[in-house]
Image (cartoon, helix red, strand yellow):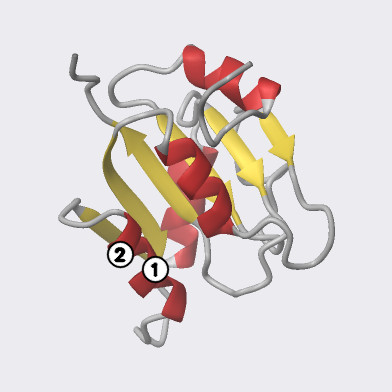
């Protein structure tokens, strides 16, 4: 029995193959995962609208791997989506890159760019996060 918040066997298996610099996309339910994730393995978790949320999946993954930095999809209006405050609280003091929608898609869609892409039931817009795995310490 695993003693972590994350118990999803498929996600755990993909994370085991990751290393420093590997990137994981946790996408909201509106994200076109099949078209904008390159050749990454895809995991669909959405059960119902809103379940699970991006932050719930991030919390579980954060319990298993070190996170070095992250990228978010910034709206064209430059308004700050409320979920950005949650990301900042969950990932304090980490570098964050804010890019437009099409640049975000480009980062996720490049060949060999993602180690894993996860779709959630998240319904809040601009709730996508691209995390970069850091270095494991002792």
| Residue 90 higher or lower than 45, as above or below | below
In the visual, does 14 lie left or right of 23?
Answer: right
Residue at the left extreme of this rendering: 93
Q: Write down the quadrant of residue 125 in the picture.
A: bottom right
Q: Left or right of 22: which side holds 25?
A: right
The relative height of residue 72 versus residue 26 in the rendered view (above or below) is below
Tell which of 38 and 22 is nearer to you: 22
Residue 5 position within the rendered picture, expressed as x and y whole percent measured from the top left: 54, 36
Q: Are marks 2 and 1 in contact (CB under 8 Å)?
A: yes
- Residue in front for this viewpoint, 11 or 21: 11
Badge 1 is on which residue? 86
Label 1: how many Cα within 10 Å (few below 14, some 14–19, many 20+): few
Query: Image quadrant for the N terminus?
Result: top right
Left or right for 34, reference 64 = right
Query: Vertically, is 34 above or below 123?
Result: above
Asked where in the image residue 81 lies, by quadrant, the reply is bottom left
| Residue at x-position 47% and y-position 48% | 59
Q: How many marks?
A: 2
Q: Position of residue 120 (x, y in %)?
A: 68, 53
Q: State which quadrant residue 118 falls in.
A: top right
Position of 19 compared to 95: left or right? right
3D distance between C-alphas at marks 2 and 1: 5 Å
Disc number placed over residue 89 in the picture, else none = 2
């Amino acid at each position: 029995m695993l003693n972590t918040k994350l118990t999803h066997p498929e996600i755990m298996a993909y994370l085991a193959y990751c290393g420093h610099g590997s990137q994981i996309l946790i996408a909201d339910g509106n994200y076109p995962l099949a078209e904008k994730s390159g050749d990454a393995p895809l995991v669909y978790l959405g059960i119902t609208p809103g379940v699970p949320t991006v932050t719930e999946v991030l919390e579980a993954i954060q319990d298993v791997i070190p996170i070095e930095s992250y990228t978010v999809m910034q709206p064209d209006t430059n308004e700050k989506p409320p979920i950005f405050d949650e990301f900042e609280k969950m990932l304090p003091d980490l570098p964050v890159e804010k890019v437009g929608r099409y640049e975000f898609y480009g980062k996720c869609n490049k060949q060999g760019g993602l180690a894993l892409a996860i779709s959630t039931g998240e319904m809040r817009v601009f709730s996508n996060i691209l995390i970069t795995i850091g270095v494991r310490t002792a």
